[in-house]
Image (cartoon, rainbow, N blue to C red):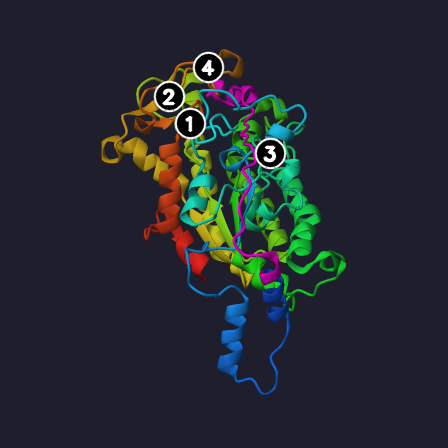
């Protein structure tokens, strides 16, 4: 355990990705007309069924044609496992994945994702029928782009729930939400309702932007792991002699609840919350403590498992403060742990080693530039020292999207959430 508390001082997580422009299927004029219809009331002569049908048509229940996206958009907040590229645009962020072997199985090549292919957000977006990849907020091309109507990714690798986690190198969760509020929301309003709408003071509950757009978007949050690795287990942050694990975890849950309530006040209604993954089983944690074989570092897993249990309870009680909110809690810890415990069942051969050769300068976290990799990435759980392979990310997305088991998605899966 003496080595465990020093382990976190060598890790700074980062994920990066390049913007992939998205194609928006509905023309701006059609959206504007839909918003006007939603905003307008029904006349006294209109029957209730006719009014309801008119509202459904104007708010997106149009003709059946080619498959439409199941949600209006997806807005993503969190850390490296859901980051689609924001750290590429941060000054001083030296941890990147914009080189081979990263992206070896990705259509765009080394795009900055810390995987051989997709991350979980990419895979989930495909299942939801989004017409392209969610662009990173920090890419200047995302501002006022029509692609942003299908979502924006605000996540920053290395960040956490606490403001000081990863301080100086990342965008904190609080700042991510501020970016959504102060930059993206005005941009979206301007695109959907015209320039004048951005300057108006909209009334929640009567605002067609909230009713017809934001309420039909998913707000995805994946964070918390770095608060343990870079804070709780890190003596360099002054946490020696700090609160016990239960108090530290309770503080994280309270702060995360505040962030969720802030998003709710801004119009978010459908939340997808990812658990922390089994960090104690990652190659970099195991290698640092000289663990061989299939054993995981249980003190680390116990810490994140406690957080995940409290996060699930937060979902259960959240509607007292956010009565119109609906949630899908995705237990990626259990999904990955099942693959680690029963590899043959999932076609996995290697559960403890990274697919790529590790870089010494990254302390065993990142792949060596142009270094060798395993021949069959589908047989590996981890691509580098910390991040899953494309195959694992796809499995997490599939289980979260469509599984009927509460061990995977709770209380409902993402597909059902999207239909609400």
Which residue is disc 3 drawn over? 86
Task: Determine the CA span between mark 1 and mark 2.
Answer: 9 Å
Q: Which residue is mark 2?
A: 355
Camera-side residue of 139 and 115: 139
Point out the tag, 3 or 2, that comes first from the N-terminus.
3
In this picture, residue 4 sits left or right of residue 254: left
Distance in Å between CA atoms under marks 3 and 2? 25 Å
Q: Position of residue 191 (x, y in %)?
A: 66, 54
Q: Is residue 277 above or below residue 330?
A: above
Q: List the single residue furthest toward the bottom.
A: 45
Do callouts 3 and 2 mark residues in contact (Cβ within 8 Å)? no
Query: Crowding near pointer 4: few (<14 within 10 Å), some, many (20+)?
Result: few
Would you name the residue on which mark 4 appears?
Answer: 370
Q: Secondary structure at mark 1?
A: loop
Q: Which mark is residue 19?
A: none
Label 1 – label 4 distance at C-alpha: 13 Å
Which residue is found at the position 49% from the left and 25% from the top?
110
Q: Which mark is residue 116?
A: 1
Q: Residues within 10 Å of mark 1 (few under 14, many from 20)?
A: many
**Placement of 37 over or under 189, stated as above or below:** below
Q: Position of residue 196 (x, y in %)?
A: 75, 59
First along the sequence among labels 1 and 2? 1
Quadrant hosting residue 206: bottom right
In front: label 4 or label 2: 4
**In magenta segment, residue 20:** yes
Where does the magenta region start and end?
Answer: 1-30
Q: Residue at x 41, y 55 (%)?
A: 67
Residue 120's place in the image compared with 9, above or below, is: below
Q: Residue visible at 58% across and 64% down?
A: 211
Which one is in front in this view, the residue at disc 4 or the one at disc 3?
Answer: 4
Give the secondary structure at mark 2: loop
- Cβ–Cβ below 8 Å for labels 1 and 3? no
């Amino acid at each position: 355990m003496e080595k465990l508390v020093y382990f976190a001082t060598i890790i700074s997580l980062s994920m990066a990705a390049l913007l992939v422009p998205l194609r928006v299927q509905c023309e701006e004029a059609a959206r504007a007309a839909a918003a006007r219809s939603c905003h307008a009331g029904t006349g006294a002569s209109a029957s209730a069924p006719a009014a309801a049908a008119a509202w459904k048509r104007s708010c997106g229940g149009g003709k059946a044609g080619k498959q439409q996206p199941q949600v209006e958009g997806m807005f993503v907040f969190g850390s490296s496992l859901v980051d689609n590229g924001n750290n590429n645009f941060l000054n001083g962020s030296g941890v990147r994945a914009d080189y081979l072997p990263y992206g070896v199985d990705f259509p765009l090549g080394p795009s900055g994702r810390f995987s051989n292919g997709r991350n979980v957000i990419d895979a989930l977006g495909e299942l939801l029928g989004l017409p392209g990849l969610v662009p990173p907020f920090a890419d200047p091309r995302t501002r006022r782009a029509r692609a942003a109507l299908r979502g924006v990714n605000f996540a920053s690798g290395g960040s956490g729930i606490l403001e000081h986690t990863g301080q100086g190198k990342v965008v904190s969760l609080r700042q991510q939400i501020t970016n959504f509020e102060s930059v993206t929301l005005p941009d979206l309003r301007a695109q959907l309702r015209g320039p004048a709408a951005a300057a108006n003071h909209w009334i929640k509950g009567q605002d067609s932007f909230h009713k017809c757009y934001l309420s039909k978007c998913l707000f995805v949050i994946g964070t918390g792991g770095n608060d343990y690795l870079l804070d709780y287990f890190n003596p360099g942050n002054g946490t020696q002699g700090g609160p016990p694990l239960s108090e530290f975890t309770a503080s994280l849950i309270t702060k995360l609840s505040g962030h969720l309530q802030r998003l709710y006040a801004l119009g978010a209604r459908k939340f997808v919350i990812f658990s922390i993954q089994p960090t104690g089983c990652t190659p970099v944690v195991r290698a640092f403590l000289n663990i061989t074989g299939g054993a995981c570092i249980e003190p680390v897993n116990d810490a994140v498992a406690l957080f995940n249990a409290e996060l699930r309870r937060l979902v259960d009680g959240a509607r007292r403060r956010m009565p119109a909110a609906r949630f899908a809690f995705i237990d990626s810890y259990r999904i990955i742990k099942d693959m680690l415990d029963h590899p043959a069942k999932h076609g996995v051969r290697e559960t403890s080693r990274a697919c790529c050769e590790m870089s010494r300068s990254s302390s065993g976290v990142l792949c060596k530039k142009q270094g060798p990799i395993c021949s069959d990435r589908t047989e590996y759980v981890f691509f580098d020292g910390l991040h899953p392979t494309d195959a694992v990310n796809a499995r997490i997305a599939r289980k979260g999207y469509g599984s009927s088991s509460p061990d995977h998605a709770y209380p409902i899966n993402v597909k059902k959430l999207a239909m609400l």
